[in-house]
Amino acid sequence: MLGMSPAAGQDKILPPMSNRRIAVLISGRGSNLQALIDAVAAKRLDATIAVVISNITGAHGLDRARQAGIPGVTLSHRDHSSRDAFETALVAELRRHDVGLVCLAGFMRLLGPTYLGAFGEQTLNIHPSLLPAFPGVDAQRQALEHGVKVAGATVHFVTGALDGGPIVAQGAVPVDDSDTADVLAERILEVEHRLYPEAVASVLDGGWVIQGRTYRKLP
């Protein structure tokens, strides 16, 4: 999904973020949104979820936002004449809420240059595979079809390459012979719900460097 593109050989230092206001972008039920809401409530994540934005009208994740007292916004891509027009409206909404970090949580839209030019270095995504294996949709089914013995989840920065940005954190899930795609997806979700808040906290707290594709702690 979308990014962070330091010049070849140039390190990208990530200092602590002074703006800890988060936007969460969703398209569906918002279970990873709920994990972030719960982490903030439990003070495991020192941040404010400033807004939840869905490109799908009636997405269940918007109900989760309302129940938590978080502003929820529907911004349908179908109401815009082009990807550029949609992304222009999205960027304006993020700026209106003074957002410092954007978290994609089941947001099923590819984001392009208009968005990347504004928030490309401030966007995380969570994907249900151990990237770079199985990018894109149906990652759990891809994993089973390839016969892997270990699957998992990855939090990464969003760049113009599909699920291809620098990796912030990963969590592994053993694959059982009896697994279906749905069963494996549910087990991976359990890891996602732990991993995403931890990764968001890591990025907000800073003290990291991106060297090429590697995200590592500064000495």
Image (cartoon, rainbow, N blue to C red):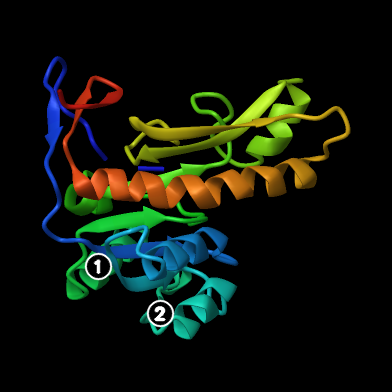
The quarter in which the N terminus is drawn is top left
Secondary structure type for disc 2? strand
Please rate how many residues cluster around mark 1, counting C-alpha atoms within 10 Å: few if below 14, some from 14 to 19, many from 20. many
The residue that mark 2 highlights is: 72
| Residue 134's disc number | none
Note whether 186 is above or below 180 in the view shown.
below
Q: How many marks?
A: 2
Secondary structure type for disc 1? helix
Note whether 165 is above or below 121 in the view shown.
above
Please name whichever residue, 71 or 35, is drawn nearer the observer in this view of the structure: 35
Query: Which residue corresponds to the image point at 41% horizontal and 46% vertical from the top-left?
Result: 125
Query: Which residue corresponds to the image point at 22% horizontal and 74% vertical from the top-left?
Result: 97
Quarter of image, res 52: bottom left
Note whether 126 is above or below 80 in the view shown.
above
Mark 2 → mark 1, Cα distance in angstroms: 12 Å
Q: Amino acid at mark 1?
A: Leu
Please name whichever residue, 175 or 90, is drawn nearer the observer in this view of the structure: 175
Query: Which residue corresponds to the image point at 54% horizontal and 29% vertical from the top-left?
Result: 130
Looking at the image, residue 82 sits to the left or right of residue 174; the answer is left
| Residue 94's disc number | 1
Q: Amino acid at mark 2?
A: Gly
From the top left corner, tell me how far across and down residue 24 is, in percent.
38, 63
Please name whichever residue, 133 or 115, is drawn nearer the observer in this view of the structure: 133
Note whether 135 is above or below 74 in the view shown.
above
Looking at the image, residue 66 sits to the left or right of residue 114; the answer is right
